[in-house]
Amino acid sequence: MHIRLLPIFSGLLLLGFSFFSLSCSSGNSAEENSTKLYEQASAYKNKGEYLKAIDCYNKGIALDSLNITSPKVVAALHEKRALEGVTGSYYDALRTTLRLEKLPEGVLSDSLRNAMLAEKAVWLRELGSFRGAAASLEKVSSPAPQIRFELASLYRELGDYRKAAEIYSEFTGTERAPVIRITALSGLLQCKVAEPELNIESVDAIAGKIAAESGRVFGMQEDLIERIQALRTASKSLQLLPNHKRNASYLLFRALTLAEESKNQLLVQILRFESNAVIVRKPDSFREAAEYFRLKNLPYARSAALFMLAESDGIDDAERVSSLQQGFSVSRNSAPPWPGEASLQLEKNAGKRLVGLLLEKSRIFELFDASEQTGFLALQRSIQQDRRSLLPGKEHALLNAEICRLQHEISGLLQRKADIFFRAEGYEKNRAADQAINIKRGRLLELVSRVRSINPRTAEIMRFSPEALQSVQGRLKDDQAIIKPLISDSLCGVMLIGKRQLQIAVSSRFDSLHTADSSIRTFRRELAHGNIHQTVEKEWFRKAFSESLEGSIEGYRHLVIISSDLFPFHILAEGNHSLDEKRYSYLQSITEFSLLSQPLKPEIWASKIYFYPVDNVSGARIHKLFAPQDRIFLLWKEYRNSELDALRQQIALAMQGTVSASEAMVSIAEKSAGGREIWRYVSLYGDD
């Protein structure tokens, strides 16, 4: 994507609007009536010139402001609302929807109101407001089963599996149509897997009913697309149970057969991809899917196909590495803010696989980039999902509002494009979404220069990108080093980055007792319960990480531990004098380090102390990015509020003699056994 051309394109577009405005506002009074404007709007809509159509609707509705309940104005508002949604002008679309919702009772027909509420729910879901989307669907009168199922899926997103299960249970009776019943059973199974304590049938019992109901779905003759989607939904549910994967694969095969009858090529290609991913995993199918998604401009779907290609049998390591690198490159500008658990796991597995392959080959410089991939995507999502103002001060309120709106709407459009892949429908929205993303990104780039003159750090956050190794080394102080644990699907290593040093050591191989995820979870759990002094896990990680660095870090006083899955490296220092006396701080990505290492403006040096449990590290990272002057501390175990108040006072007292929060923690640890306890369970999040 040639981003640099976007501001020019945006400028030409605005210039075009200026000429159009003149044409819209010129001419005799007979042509300047609202009916004529609505006719012009309809003509522009039919030609796909949606922004011009919206402009005409706005002008016409303004002329009709005293007659807002008339049928032609209601129709115009409805058309305008729909076009604002298509073009990703979410905020305008929601305002127009609210205007329609406030009309007197009886002005809108039930069918129009229901359609409006359902579409509003789609927009809110794309924007990440699952609770708002659910509230909208709750207002739909006499909802069809599909509306109820969508509502249940929103409650699942919110973690309210009990309420979701109640909705699905309404449709599991044998009197229901097969498509409805199998969809409801599939939703129930997902709820039971997510929350086993639910008072419903066992997962195996529900899975058995799904298998039985699938035969009735196969026997239907009507509703072809609905049957395909129902079988696809059922397969996804069964894939959650390892011993039902063959049934899941069979349902996808049957769905694919039906899709080929439908001539719906998007559905066919997605089902081929999904069917291949369950068991067979033939590389040619993933290559074909990746190319199809590239041609269809569905980059996030393409990255998924490339990640799955890397997991296929029968390809060499060079193609695996290339596929993974391409996948992350493609997803960098296309990753949605709310991808779902399966896609997040696919990204995480791809990151570990890439790190492992490069570790084995000792490809050091590529490994630096690879080790940041999942951390970069996580940081990007944290910023997408956060709605806080970038610039302090009332004088920047309008600029803040525009930036926030653009970023939020871009994230919604990225989610819309990804949902085409996730839901296997809605491709007709793709072109308009692409155009809207380009226009909004172009406008956002125009605003970066204004923001840079106010706060350069904030401008960098708006357009951050992965950092090059030399750039990172240039930001390090002489006594400062980055320690980056390297955790793959099979190997464990560690990277040391100093101002003039780069070292990578492959130390240990994971086994059945020590997998990457389980080992880190166990180690953190043992730390939280105070059982970390002499354990198998501690010894294993000491050999894996700190032993390989002995002798290499003696000249460094401050160690910044950077890992997307935070690991309490400082605990490994206990009993090792060369590590024990050092300052420690934590971050989740090297990009954060680069952003935070830029000097603060003197006027924002006043700071406060805040604490975040390590399970809410995303809250800590966003707080630190947008309020870098504050001192943010991670808690490796649970503390009561009264304990935190005392801790805040103790840290503040220790910081009176230093500007470094990590230095203050060393000072606290040296004074007493109680101070040592604080050092063990409280760590700085940041770079200072």
Image (tube, rainbow, N blue to C red):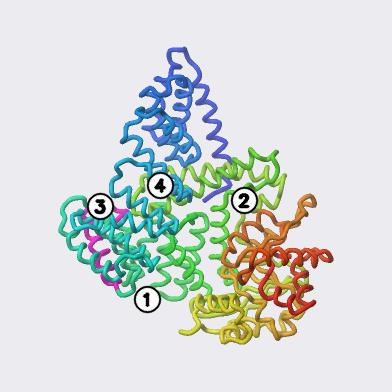
Residue occupied by mark 2: 462
Task: Check if residue 184 falls in the magenta segment.
Answer: no
Q: State left or right for residue 334 relative to residue 601.
A: left
Sequence order check: which comes first, mark 2 or mark 4?
4
Instruction: Determine which quarter of the picture holds residue 283.
Output: bottom left
Nearer to me, 468 or 69 = 69
Return the residue nearer the eye: 673 or 415. Answer: 673
Badge nearest the viewer, 4 or 1:
4
Circles 2 and 1: CB distance less than 8 Å? no
Checking the image for residue 314, the label placed there is: 1
Q: Which residue is mark 4?
A: 430
Tell me how far mark 3 sits from mark 2, CA to CA: 42 Å
Q: Going from the N terminus, do you reach mark 2 or mark 1 first?
A: 1
Q: Which residue is mark 3?
A: 226
Q: Is residue 260 visible?
A: no
Which residue type does callout 1 highlight? Gly
What amino acid is labelled 3 in the image? Answer: Glu
Q: CA distance from mark 4 to mark 3?
A: 22 Å
- Nearest the eye: 509 or 529: 529
Q: Amino acid at mark 2?
A: Met
